[in-house]
Amino acid sequence: MNDYTGLMNLISNVGFPIVIAIYLLHRFEQKLDTLVENINILSQAIEKQHQGME
């Protein structure tokens, strides 16, 4: 119940669009972190495959 009250206070103080924007930015950051991690793994796999061809 305390989280709900805090959320309602935040919405009433800064406005619904700002709260939604903050939420979406937080989710977007998590997805970017996952993407960066996967790109690093892929890069390592490509490097290993390239080394095996030499």
Image (cartoon, rainbow, N blue to C red):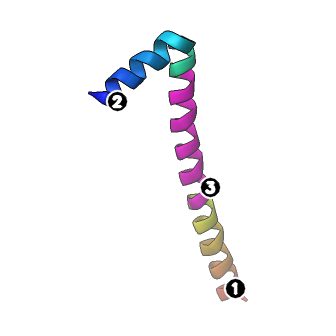
The quadrant of the rendering that contains the N terminus is top left
Callout 1, which amino acid?
Answer: Gln
Callout 2, which amino acid?
Answer: Asp
Relative side of 11 to 29, left or right: left
What is the CA distance from the residue labelled 3 to the residue labelled 1?
23 Å
> What residue did someone put label 1 on?
51
Q: Earlier in the sequence, mark 2 or mark 1?
A: 2
Magenta-drawn segment: 21-37
Q: In terms of secondary structure, where does tag 2 sit? A: helix
Q: In terms of secondary structure, where does tag 1 sit? A: helix
Magenta stretch containing residue 36, yes or no?
A: yes
Badge 1: few (under 14), some or many (20 or more) residues near its Cα, within 10 Å? few
- Percent of width and height locating residue 53: 68, 86
Query: At 50% across and 29% down in the image, what residue appears?
Result: 23
Does residue 13 lie above or below 49 as drawn? above
What is the CA distance from the residue labelled 2 to the residue labelled 3?
31 Å
Nearest the eye: 52 or 14: 14
Q: Nearer the viewer, mark 2 or mark 3?
A: 2
